[in-house]
Image (tube, rainbow, N blue to C red):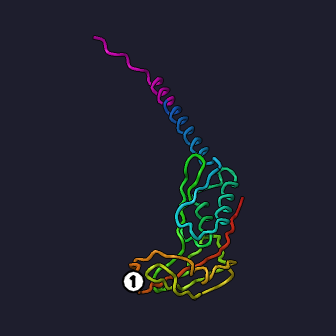
Amino acid sequence: MTAPKPVPIGRRVLAGIGALVVIAAIGTAGWHGYHEILAAPVKRVVFAGDLDRLSHAELDALAQAIQAAPPGSVTLATVREAAKRVPWVREATVRRQFPDAVEITFERRFSPGGAPPAESAMVAGDKLLGRQVMSLAIDGAGKVSGCKVVAASGDTGLTYGCEDVAAEHFATSAPATAAAERQGYMTILVYGHTEHVV
């Protein structure tokens, strides 16, 4: 029996280099493909969550701004920050729906309890233009039975006040027949944002 002839070292090195080149080409193609998908323009904006009191004009303006953005400039973080600037929004969650949509889920700004909310920390680049805090008394059925503006600063530019909040309905943990009132605070923040564009 004859032993197999050993493969010369030059061939092994050449085969290894060839394999590395193929792996690098596949990785590069995958990387570029991934970035091409992320750079695709957003054609649809889907809204979900607490939309009852959000202005349709504000939502339409947000959707148009996202759709008009240059390809590749729309990131989940920038969409989330823009969504959080819509009046009454406390939090926004954003996810990409491939290939051409983003979904924004809103949570309204309302703080249940007897203590006024603390000042919100501003994100770098944001400037607080106006703030209004309303103390609300809410009955067991979720109807606003009392409202008072307890803090205001700057100019919110909104006409929303106690008369408007009285038309709101809140889900409460108390049974609908309970006579006890709950207290909560609603905060309205209006702020601007500056960005450094290179």
Foreground residue among 189 and 177: 177
* Circle 1: element type: loop
Residue 31, above or below 166: above
Image quarter in which the N terminus is found: top left
- Tell me the amino acid under the disc marked 1: Ala
Foreground residue among 19 and 44: 44
Image-based side of 79 in relation to 172, left or right: right
Quarter of the image for residue 187 reads: bottom right
Expressed as whole percent of the image width and height from the top left, the position of residue 94 reads: 55, 59
- Residue 11 sits inside the magenta stretch: yes
Q: Residue at x 56, y 47 (%)?
A: 98
Q: Residue at x 55, y 53 (%)?
A: 96
- Residue 22 sits inside the magenta stretch: no
Query: Which residue range is magenta in the image?
Result: 1-18
In the rendered image, which residue does mark 1 sit on? 178
Q: Residue at x 65, y 70 (%)?
A: 125
Expressed as whole percent of the image width and height from the top left, the position of residue 54 reads: 60, 69
Image quarter in which the C terminus is found: bottom right
Q: Residues within 10 Å of mark 1 (few under 14, many from 20)?
A: few
